[in-house]
Image: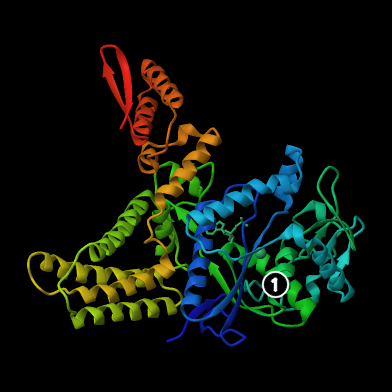
Amino acid sequence: MALRLYNTLSGKIEDFHPLDDNRVRMYACGPTVYDYGHIGNFRTFIAVDLLYRFLRQSGYEVRYVMNITDVDDKIIRNSAHDGVSVQQYTAKYIQAFLEDSATLGIEKPIFVRATEHINAMADFIAELAKKGFAYRTEDGSYYFRIAKFPEYGKLSKKDFAGMNDGARVDVDEYEKDSARDFALWKAPKPGEASWETAIGPGRPGWHIECSVMSMEELGPSFDLHAGGEDLIFPHHENEIAQSESLSGQQFARYWFHARFLLVEGQKMSKSLGNFFTIRDLVLRGHKPSSIRWLLSQVPYRNQLNFTFDGLKSAASSVEKLRNFRFRLTSTQFPAGSTPQIAQLAQETIDKMKSALDDDLNTAEAQAAMFDMLRKVNTVLDAAQAGQNNFRQEDVKPLLGALTKFDEIFGVLNDDDQPKMKAILEWARAEGREKEISPELLGIAGSAQLTDEQVNQKLAEMEAARKTRNFKTSDALRAELTGAGIIVENTKEGVRWRRK
Ligand code: AMP
Ligand code: ZN
């Protein structure tokens, strides 16, 4: 069986065939870098990462491009508010996004940045205007003329025929020919960043950014375009309208959309207090591998409900996999092989492949692996009890299946500790010590403290105890223990030594 994917454009599961033999060209809408990315964003990025990894495992050569939206209204507003340039404002969040992606073991796409393609965007808009698909308003903004593109709505399946042109939503946009028309280019506002281009000064609209960058990197017609389900309308609908009007060709052929993530059954929002970044979770002591596992567990088109119970059970699943591998590699078994084991390993590989071929059914692929784990563990338990039913040569095919599995899921390599330590140090540098949990300190552990830092922490601990702030004093004690410092209460007062 070959890969079958749900295509939002056709509304059906289809066989996946790239345009150009075994070369796949894919584009994913990346982050808008005005803040740290949240776990919802990363659900989508991990879904695309799994797809990318599986395409490669299936033998495709993949050119995978992701944009970084480093200019949009929020970024321009926030940077103007802070009195810094757009570049200065976004640098921190671009860095954070790259770090968080690496923390979650996400493979690197080819990154493109909107601010590096502004002139190409202006040229694209000029071309659309020449063909009658775009028009300029008095203030120097440009809009797309939806009436010229009758297929508008084909992705989101919205029916625009009956939409009332008088239903204007944005009073700023009173100059538009039709209320539905969307902005391609926005005239500059006083005090806000803008660019000088062939079509005049201003800034690009969000939708044009992705049309220009994807076509520049992948050509006018490419295989796959991905993003979260919220992007279907208007973002992707508008990308199609712009791109197909310009090129006269089909833009992306397959549209891949990840379903939104909920937290404890609710929409994530700052006001509900259920809004988490990757760093928030690590500060609470959760391992990156648990987060990655949880985000990849539910097939991308199903609702993923993020819960702390789920995160705990994700941690235990990862632990089971790592223990299993350890068990295989740390024991010397009697020479020879058992054909049933090699057969089981091959069956597991086949089941994983057919699960992932089936519209990337990650849950089923993971179930196949755990089925193998259970069966082999039973055999290993018996072997430990003296039965001669597991042989040294059985290890290799099992490790082979684990490797194939991990090429997709990426959790076997235990590098949680250094990653967590990096986030611990980041929290300290950002003055967010209060959020550092004892659990994180325990895992990130061995962070070296100088004598001076130890004395400082002890003083803080004393002060906290005096004000009966035991949560803080316990956290500090755990931090010291984690750093290998032994604290003793003696008659002479508190003393400490290194382990
Ligand atoms: P943004 O940084 O808002 O442009 O979003 C980056 C990506 O994350 C887009 O593909 C969004 O569709 C996706 N996204 C945003 N919120 C969620 C969520 N709660 N669940 C899944 N994906 C999301
Ligand atoms: Zn986009």
- State left or right for residue 218 relative to residue 172: left
The quarter of the picture where residue 154 lies is bottom right
**Depth check: 274 or 372 in front?**
372
Q: Quadrant of the N terminus?
A: bottom left
Identify the residue at horizontal 48%, vertical 68% (top origin). Answer: 50
The answer, for residue 28, to whether it is visible in the render is yes
Task: Report x, y in % for residue 94.
Answer: 63, 52
Is 432 on the left or on the right of 93, as rendered? Answer: left
> In front here: 383 or 135?
383
The quadrant in which the C terminus is found is top left
Kind of residue indicated by mark 1: Glu
**Residue at the spot 48% in from the left edge and 33% down from the top edge:** 433
Residue 404, image x, y percentages: 38, 73
Q: Position of residue 179 (x, y in %)?
A: 78, 62
Q: Which residue is mark 1?
A: 217
Q: x%, y% of residue 108?
A: 56, 63
Answer with the quarter of the image where residue 89 lies. Answer: top right
Which residue shows up at 42% across the image and 76% down it? 356
Is 240 rendered above or below residue 416? below
Q: Look at the picture and state if 498 lies above or below 241.
A: above
Looking at the picture, does residue 315 appear above or below residue 144? Answer: above
Left or right: 52, with 217 as reference point:
left
Residue 161 can be seen, yes or no? no
**Left or right of residue 345, residue 51 in this image:** right
